[in-house]
Structure formats: structure tokens, C-alpha cells
Image (cartoon, rainbow, N blue to C red):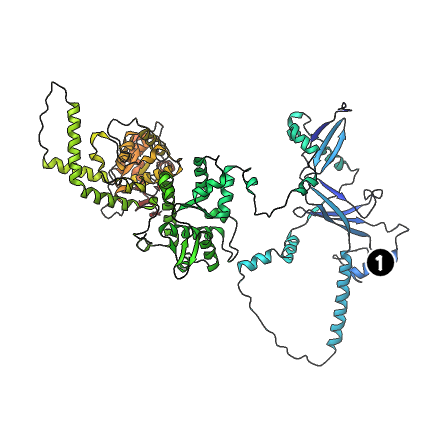
Amino acid sequence: MGSAAKWIDVYLAKSLAEKLYLFQYPVRPASMTYDDIPHLSAKIKPKQQKVELEMAIDTLNPNYCRSKGEQIALNVDGACADESSTYSSKLMDKQTFCSSQSTSNTARYAAALYRQGELHLTPLHGILQLRPSFSYLDKADAKHREREAANEAGDSSQDEAEEDVKQITVRFSRPESEQARQRRVQSYEFLQKKHAEEPWVHLHYYGLRDSRSEHERQYLLCQGSSGVENTELVKSPSEYLMMLMPPSPEEEKDKPVAPSNVLSMAQLRTLPLADQIKILMKNVKVMPFANLMSLLGPSIDSVAVLRGIQKVAMLVQGNWVVKSDILYPKDSSSPHSGVPAEVLCRGRDFVMWKFTQSRWVVRKEVAAVTKLCTEDVKDFLEHMAVVRINKGWEFILPYDGEFIKKHPDVVQRQHMLWSGIQAKLEKVYNLVKETLPKKPDGQSGPAGLVSGDQRVQVARSKAQQNHALLERELQRRKEQVRASMVLPSVRIKEEPMSEEGEEEEEQEADEDEESMDTSLGGALHNRLANGLPGGRVAGGDSFNGHPPPGCASTPVARELRAFVEATFQRQFVLTLSELKRLFNLHLASLPPGHTLFSGISDRMLQDTVLSAGCKQILVPFPPQTAASPDEQKVFALWESGDMSDQHRQVLLEIFSKNYRVRRNLIQSRLTQECGEDLSKQEVDKVLKVHSLWGMRPGATACSSLAQVEADSVGKSSRRV
């Protein structure tokens, strides 16, 4: 390769990048410019990049036909001239140039200025071609038609005969539908009207040799000539080579052209794993996990696929169904009814939820609840079901029990997600819990869809049946523990347990039976989770996530304590119900196989809260309150190490004695205890920061002007 003849520094100037236009005059040669011709006016529509220039015509030129100019002015303006006349001198002494875009993509074009061995480039904002406008001829035709119409009206007015009365028909237009509105918006007339509505911006023209023009041309030079500020021109060798030698168009034409919605498996496997899963689920709609793994290839990790599939699909009867927001993006609408995507997603989620309850769905019932048209509901059902004559729509794939047994942690997370979706559907569609469909006894469904109440009922009945057996087993294990702990030289006197002690122990065991709903549904078939009282496990074995004393250093306890501390650092006051809800959301965000999926009881959660520096606030609820027992258990962070600890402790002491407190009493108490004269705004800020002024759902407290009573999660009433 030969040596370079000369090195030239290239700079990118941006001062005029959004204002620089290139004007082209295709009807005149380059030797005949308009530089020396007076420009009378100029105006622009910036959004459309439309420019109009008015230039003077040399009427003294020997090539100018004066009689023709006078005739054109007469035809355009008429005999009497006024302010609205196009040609005020009664002579065609100017012409108008109107622009049109030469190209819509100006990213590859720039204006270059070479000075002192440096090349300065400024990107072009637009390239416009200006041609003479003959709109004055249209104005002359309009004047001619007006004169003819006036002459005809004058002739008809001389006729004394009276015109006959004509009957007219008045019609009222119907309300415009969504489809009609979209067609009208996309029509040519509507676009022309929108273009005409944009106002003109009048400009002042400066000639080529004007001092102002010379000043503006200085902006074509890069203001900072150091190479540090021109990083836009720094390219890697491969990128620079691609810019110098782009691929030839012939190579691109040789590639087979496939439809836009078709992607070969070879092209699919070049994409990231998340995109592969999304494309497959968007096209197939419903797929078992085993089929998805076979399509992705044997080298793909199943754990990574499980993480990716949960982002784009939901578990229904052991199979994966693509999420509604994947099929109906945010700004889309129904092709049948024009309904927005949000309503379509809600209706399709209702259909998916119905299939988690039963294998059969009736289209008319879905349409009656969702209030959607028949075509939209049919589209939902065709994605995931097949129609059976005289029966309804059946889920398209059989129940995949193998996946349910193999991945119980994924099933539990999906169950929690479906519980949240069900709560939203009940609120939107006003579904009554008593009328919700129940799963038939003979149907085998996903284990993750068993509700917490059902688990507790089954566990209690099973515990009552096996009570005698459990008592004997408990006694035997206690004897073994005692025997292993007795020293050789020490004898322990055995005394019979009183009936009182047995009743207390049974009462404690019954309290432990109701644990938080975080255990797997599949455990109903494996010694019935919650069937064994948590307080009666012999030998100190951990059951249902409730560790025996002295096991606070286990991984489960450490993870749970970290969650509790992080939660109370964000929200200083929480009820047990709200804390359980936040814990379920935390579980849903954890990866499969996490230690917290072993199950956490209510007692373990409360003990962890108390051990993390929190205290239980015994709020005196009124007898008529509708709050549940979990909502009446209020916990608060006592010390966080900041300046607000003293304010928070005073507030918590106040609400531990009173259910309703006036704000002025709170203000006086804070001033008395803290020694600070707090204003009304400062008291409001303290109440708001510590969640006592307008509490979150699940908490109950009152202040002077704001009262919040949380009857249940999602049923909080707020009034000011």
C-alpha cells in the first residue's frame, strides 16, 4: 500500500445541525443563480419542512413583456386594487417559489467547509427543491368564475317569475365509530387539513454578501478544534472498513426472501435465549415445557429456560401459555372492535384463569363477564382451546402432571401470580367469591392451585384422625430424648403430665397449625403439609419452616431476617397481613430452588420480626372493626439509628393507648417529649414519613383530620 499524500483533520460542527437546509433550483442551470435577485419575503413550516420564497421580477428587462404582465395582474386581482391584491403595482412584478423535499433521509448528507487544512462537516437538516409556483393562475380562474356567476345572477334577478319552493332533506349523522375514525385520520383529506393547520413562520432574508450572513457562516466551523471534543468521528478499524467498503447489494439480493412473520430455526438459534423463547411462545401460543426444550436444543440449560419462560408465559394445567401483553402490546387495539390492548389483555387473562379452574369453558359465559364482542372472545379461545360440540371449549393440551411434580417451586410461584391476577379480575369484573367456579372432584389439576384455606382444613381433619397415633409417637420420642440427655450419675423423677398441661400443649399446637400459605400444594399428597402440629415435632426437627430454638443461624433464618430488616427499613409500620403479602411478592421474585421455598410459618415470621429490633404495637381496635386478626397485629421498627427514632417512639406509644387521636394532641406530645416546637407542617411530615398519616392498606390508625381504617388488604377506605 502506498503512503498517504496528505493528512487532513476532519471536524464535526453541530451549531447549525438542526437549522441547515440545502436549497436546489432544478429549473435553472447552475450558472444562473438567484443570489443577486431581490428576495421580497420568506416563510417556512418547520414540521413539514416547507418553504416559500417571493422574488422580484426585473420588469425593465428588454425580454419582459409588459402587456402580458399587466394582463396577468388584471386577471388575478381584477380592475380595483386593494390590500389583498397579489400584484399591488397592477403588473406581474414578482414570482413565488414553493419547496418540496428531495429526500426524507438526510443522515448521509452534510455541508463541508475546507479551511486552513481542516475539513469541517455540518449535518444537513433538510434538502429542498424550489420550483416556481403557479397558484396565481388558480386565483385568476376563481376570479373568472366569480364574474360569470355574478353575471348570471344579474340576469336571473330581472326575471319577475318567482322560483318554486324546493323540498330539502335533513339528515343527522350517526356517532362516529372507532374504525371510522381511524379511516378518517388516515385519509388524504385529513392529512392535507393537518398540513394546512400548521402556521407559517415568517423569516427575514439576508443576501450572500450581507454581514449577518457572514456571521452565520462562521457556525459552519467547529467551535472546539481539539480532537477530544470530536468523538463522533472516532471509529474502530472494522467499523471504518465497513463504511469504506459496504456489502454489495447483489449479495443481499441473493439471500432468499421469507415472509416477515416466518423465522427459520437456523436464524432463531442465532438470537439470545430470551428472544428465542419469546418468539416461539408468541407463534405457538401454548406449549409443554418438554416440547420447548426439544425446540431449543439439547445444549440449552433447563434452569435458564425456566427463568426465561416465566417472563413471557403463565402456567396453565402444567403447560405454558403466552402472556396476554406479549400478544397485545400497549399501543395496539382489536382488529374486530377497536378495543384497546388493556381491555383485551384483561379479557384473555380471565379466559386463562378459567382454564386453571377447569378444563372446560363456555364462550357465552366469558362474553357475558368480559363484555367483549364474539370475535375477540373467539380469538382468545382459539389460542388455547378446541371447541367440542354441545360441551364448550376444552383446553387444547392434556394436563402435564410430570412437570408439576418435577418443578414444585415454579408451580408455587405461578400459583401466587395467579392469586394476584384473580384478585384483580374479581375487582374489575365484580366477581362474587361464592359464584367462582370450583374444580370438579374427579379432575386432577395443578397442585399449586390449592388454596390456603383448603390446605388448613385438610391438615386439621388429618391431624384429628391421627391424634392418638401422633400422641404415642410424640411420647416415644420424648422418652428417647430424655434418655439421651440423662447423665450416668443423675436420676430424673418422672411425674405424670396434668390435664391442664395437656390442654395448654394442645392449644399451642392448634395455634401452630395455621401457617402462612407458602408451602407447596404437592405436599398434600406427601404426609399432608400442616397436618402435623408445628409445636409437637419431637427431637427438635424443623417442620414447615419453623425452626426449633437455637437454630437462628440456619440459612432459612438468615434469609428471612434479611428480608424483614430490609422491609422495615423501607416501611416503619406494618401489619402481619401486609408483611405476609410483601413476603409472597418477595418469594415470587426469587429464583427456583431458593431456601425460602421450604415454607415459613406465621410464628417464625413474627419471631423474626421481634428479633430484628421491632416491637408489636397493641392498638386498641374498636369492637365493631372489620379488620381480620392478622390486620390487628401491628409491628413497628423501634430503633433505626437515625434522628427520627424519638418521634417514631412517641407516636407508637400514643397509638398503643388510643385508636383515634387528634393532631393537636400529637403535636403537643411531640413538643413535650422531644423538646422541640414543631409546626403543623413538620408534624404532618413526621406522620407521613412514619406511615401514620394515611396508612398503607392493612394498618389502622387515625390522626386529627385524616382517618384510615384498613378492613382488609385491598379494602381500605381513605377520607380526608
Q: Is residue 613 left or right of residue 257?
A: left
Q: Quadrant of residue 651?
A: top left
Most foreground residue, 627 or 163: 627
Percent x, y of residue 211: 77, 36
Find numbered disc 1 in the image and state the secondary structure of the residue it sits on.
helix
| Residue underneath mark 1 | 70
Q: Crowdedness of circle 1 by 10 Å Cα count: few (<14), some, many (20+)?
A: some
Percent x, y of residue 468: 15, 40
Q: Is residue 541 left or right of residue 645?
A: left
Q: Compared to 455, does 304 lie above or below?
A: above
Percent x, y of residue 232: 65, 31
Most foreground residue, 185 or 661: 185
**Residue shown at the point (48%, 45%) measured from the top left:** 281
Q: Is residue 148 left or right of residue 667?
A: right
Q: Quadrant of the N terminus?
A: top right
Most foreground residue, 691 or 500: 500
Q: Compared to 473, does 360 lie above or below?
A: below
Q: Is residue 266 left or right of residue 542?
A: right
Res 627 seen here: no
Percent x, y of residue 523: 29, 40
Q: Quadrant of residue 500?
A: top left
Most foreground residue, 423 or 264: 264
Residue type highlighted by circle 1 = Glu
Number of disc labels: 1
Q: Quadrant of residue 447?
A: top left
**Residue shown at the point (51%, 44%) measured from the top left:** 279
Res 143 seen here: yes
In the rendered image, the residue lying farthest to the top is 489
